[in-house]
Amino acid sequence: QVQLVESGGGLVQAGGSMRLACAASGRTNSGYDIAWFRQTPGKEREFVAGIKWSGSGDRTFYADSVKGRFIMSRDNAKDTVYLQMTSLKPEDTAVYSCAAGRFVMVLNTASSYHNWGQGTQVTVSS
């Protein structure tokens, strides 16, 4: 079982930047796919970005809504992944959660993951 803890959320003005971190309790740098999802009240979790593990090099994927604005990265030495968010918009307001799983079938589907963090609130004011 992998435990995930997010940090870095808060309030930011539109156009600003924020970096989220997700620290894992165990070694997740081999075989583990990790993703960021976000959720607003009354809506399902939405895929934001994910890293697909590969022995030949990780591959990173983004939702169209954040492509070009968000960058996800992984620091294997710290067992931590980051989500650097720039040019933030009010519609980016949500609870952001990280998720991890070994060799998940579908990277951008929440049901693929069994390990979730508690989430961190990101609020973008207009």
Image (cartoon, helix red, strand yellow):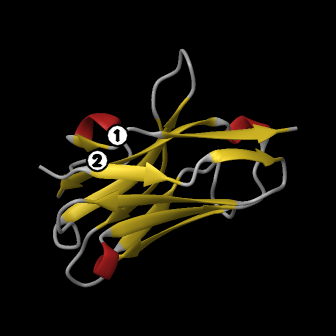
Give the number of callouts: 2
Amino acid type at circle 1 is Thr
Residue at the image position 16 percent from the left and 67 percent from the top? 31
- Quarter that holds the C terminus: top right
As measured in the structure, the alpha-carbon distance from the residue carrying label 2 to the one carrying label 1 is: 6 Å
Q: Along the line of sight, which residue is nearer the eye, 46 or 115?
A: 115
Up-down relation of residue 22 to residue 60 (above or below): above
Q: Is residue 3 left or right of residue 47?
A: left
SS state under label 2:
loop
Q: Is residue 113 left or right of residue 85?
A: left
Residue 72 picture location, percent across and down: 50, 66
Residue at the image position 38 percent from the left and 38 percent from the top? 118
SS state under label 1:
loop
Residue 18 picture location, percent across and down: 67, 58
Q: Is residue 43 visible?
A: yes
**Residue 76 lies in what quarter of the image?**
bottom left
Residues marked 2 and 1 touching at CB (< 8 Å): yes
Up-down relation of residue 21 to residue 79 (above or below): above
Name the residue that disc number 1 marks: 109
Amino acid type at circle 2 is Val
**Residue 68 lies in what quarter of the image?**
bottom right
Q: Residue furthest bottom?
A: 56
How many other residues sit within 10 Å of disc 2, few (<14), some (14-19) or many (≥20)? few
Residue at the image position 56 percent from the left and 54 percent from the top? 8
Name the residue that disc number 2 marks: 106
Q: What label does residue 59 carry, if any?
A: none
Residue 100 picture location, percent across and down: 27, 52
Q: Along the line of sight, which residue is nearer the eye, 25 or 109?
A: 25
